[in-house]
Image (tube, coloured by chain):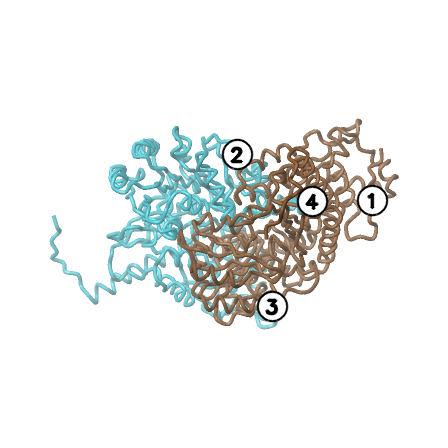
Chain colours: A cyan, B brown
Amino acid sequence: MSLAIQLERTGHVALYQQIVEQVKDRISSHRLPPGARLPTIRQFAQELGVTRVTIQNAYNELQTGGWIEATTGRGTFVSQTMQPNAAMRLSSQQLTPDAVIGDILQINEIVGVRSMASASPDPALFPVDEFWNTLNELRHQASALVSYSSSQGDPFLRIEVANQLEERGIRVLPDDILITSGVTQSLSLITQTLCRPGDSVLVEQPTYLGALHVLKAHGVQVIGAPLDAEGPELDVLERLAIQHRPRFFYTIPSFQNPTGLCMSLARRQALLALAERHNFLLVEDDIYAPLAYDQPAPPALKALDRTGMVIHTSSFSKTFMPGLRLGYVVAPPPLHQNLLTMRRATDLCSPPLSQRMMANFLATRGLQKHLRRVLPIYRERRDALLAALQHRMPHTVTWTKPVGGFCCWLTLPRHHALSNLHQLTLQQGWAFAPGDVFLVQPSTNYHLRVCFGNQGVETIRSGIEVLGNLIRECLQRADLRNPQPSDWTPLV
Amino acid sequence: MSLAIQLERTGHVALYQQIVEQVKDRISSHRLPPGARLPTIRQFAQELGVTRVTIQNAYNELQTGGWIEATTGRGTFVSQTMQPNAAMRLSSQQLTPDAVIGDILQINEIVGVRSMASASPDPALFPVDEFWNTLNELRHQASALVSYSSSQGDPFLRIEVANQLEERGIRVLPDDILITSGVTQSLSLITQTLCRPGDSVLVEQPTYLGALHVLKAHGVQVIGAPLDAEGPELDVLERLAIQHRPRFFYTIPSFQNPTGLCMSLARRQALLALAERHNFLLVEDDIYAPLAYDQPAPPALKALDRTGMVIHTSSFSKTFMPGLRLGYVVAPPPLHQNLLTMRRATDLCSPPLSQRMMANFLATRGLQKHLRRVLPIYRERRDALLAALQHRMPHTVTWTKPVGGFCCWLTLPRHHALSNLHQLTLQQGWAFAPGDVFLVQPSTNYHLRVCFGNQGVETIRSGIEVLGNLIRECLQRADLRNPQPSDWTPLV
């Protein structure tokens, strides 16, 4: 049996990694069912024209992830413990941001499911060697770096973050920076510091589901402002600001989650003027800004801020490694002190060892080097996604054209046949994030967030093929059962 | 010039480390003033009868910490940049838990100050080699361990924590455990989940200042219940429970911070009965329990809990390394889910790499081995502290006899001359934690928390000598200025 693996020999991705991806693909699409025997290492190496070591590496990784099982003397088989049904059960809870965050974090560990639900970088592209070397250079200082440390964060890391910020046009001193465990913690500290239960906060509609969860967990009334191609619609935002007197507006101006869109410079300036006029703060989530595929992001809101209206936060979770849990927040001085006080009431401090590692990695310009390597790969994946959507989606489906970041936002007809679409994809071994949890007010359409960062081009194509076929089937089957009246009159 | 260094050649502490400690001691006591020249490596090695490598290692460490400076060709000198005055300025803020937590975390980084203010383990005793080896064994799985991970925590770590808990008499499944970044985060999650602003919570008086900060930051009304030698005074506690209907009682039953005392088994049982009778939860902070110097801690409250009244939390910050930022909480099932939801609204997850490292370290019984090595050292330090207090304190000062943990609680007369004692010690290069910040209601006395975990025996003796002399001087000087009436009549 041939597995029809196709290798890209001039590509950026290691051969063994390409094999891993495509075998997972065959398994999750059931072309390789549970219990199926895989070729021997010798056969497979011969078929693909690669070394046996390459196949061995691929099999090792598949085995570690639970996808295949090797029995000495008998051979290598697709694991019997594929768990798309477990994923189904997992996800059949209520569609709240809380539940969906839990699902997205766990789904990567479920054997037999390929996830395009998580806005994460690709672990296969992590600069693990550089990370590990930078870590090991700290060996001789280890005991000082596993003690309690400053709540504000490692001074060396704050110096490097100040340098990074300068490249984004933001001039601050290391002392103005508070290290956090990421944007989620920044938002949690900001919300606890600025809001009392019942206070209003404006967000973009749609927006990062984690932000919605933080705000709701603290009893805040969340109000969504719609987006157009250039950013939030300011006339609506102004009306909402007058009506609700919000404590702040949470925005992701550059390569927004979940749309991948970028706020124009003109809109940024107008937004700042609006915030000043109506006296609410802007909380700027800049996490995706360095992941620009067509042209650099415009200056950060904080870089344009003349009057101290902007709280700026970002992290290294999208550009480097999410599992380090390191981010930062820059706030106007009185608020900075209050955030620091709240940080001490939250978890004291971030681990000093990973902070110093990150400081040294930044100091040697490791992040820039890493981004130069991965940006073309992510751009290629974005292009592959857009081409596949064009090729596979029925004409009733539309989507954003992401210019950076990891997210694309699909808009589907609000047809009852599509109400549990993300669960149907799970049954076929594919995870996409259901759109409703990114919304404050209900939409007239269904939506999905499709992430292209952490899957290879082949996998993206397969996933979109599966999704497109499924949407078509759902709609056709529904049409057969309940034919829609064809003599409808549009409402005018 | 001889530095009168005395080496303990059969001790547990490396010779170079002993030299480091004693040189720091001479510097902070000004017997070695800024700019003083230190002996050459050859001279010093000869004087002490040790190898030159030993002296070289000691000088390297002193130089890294900023205590000494070497100028090629000129020699080695005590640093000119001693900063006790900076520490003074730092600490001259208002005496709030928030400010004092910040000071305690930062004071270790201030050159020229020896700190007995922080309830930390000794970095010189950290099992750094074992830690680093366990970490490096994860090298091949690195990319999977720097991604996003489960909010509940690494399943392997939860299995090991469940095993640890079983040794404390607590039988739970790995699924009942929520990994946190430490007890501070556990308390923050518990408070946010259980309390609304204005709700009441009972604590021990005195108690962990971090707990007071968490509770106050969330607008909770905190009420202190006094302690006797066996634990909280239950008649008072009962009266307070009836009066205030608290959401919970926060207690550190084993080797309490800041007293070092241990709640008796009988008191634990009576406390559980009381909590059940008046329907409030018990939040048990078990962080010091394994650090028992005389006899093992009695069973945890959670081990005695038949009706689900106890939330149990602990961490590896005192027994292993604080800078890992790993702890855990076990709560009755409905609350467990709410804590998990709040964790997702706080910081998503703990770093998976350090979690797996800790899991593997526990699985190989590394923690038990480490504790077997360090417990005798901490016991010796406790004994040295008690002997020094006996020897050096004026008779008006009393103190607790810690039977575990890192803390001793000093009670001083409430004499105006002692009101800024902890600042006067800072001027002499010694940090102790001011007592007021551990209290909810004001005390009729002054207090200091004296920690003996992270300083060697010699340093402890010097610190207590300095403290004793200072107290005497303050009181004498005040007596000369304002002689107390000697014909006083006791109130009966």
In the picture provided, is A473 more to the left or to the right than A329?
Answer: left
Q: Secondary structure at mark 4?
A: helix
- Asked if the residues shown at circle 4 and circle 2 are in contact, with their CB atoms under 8 angstroms apart, the answer is no
> What's the mark number on residue A175?
2
Q: Chain of mark 1?
A: B
Decide: few, some or many residues near mark 2? Use Cα within 10 Å; few <14, some 14-19, many ≥20. Answer: some
Residue type, numbered disc 1: Gln
Which of B14/A446 is in front?
A: B14
Residue at mark 1: B6
Residue at mark 3: B265
Using the image, determine if residue A128 lies above or below residue A232.
Answer: below
Residue at mark 4: A140
Q: Earlier in the sequence, mark 4 or mark 2?
A: 4
Which of B417/B108 is in front?
A: B417
Same subunit: marks 4 and 1: no
- Asked if the residues shown at circle 3 and circle 2 are in contact, with their CB atoms under 8 angstroms apart, the answer is no
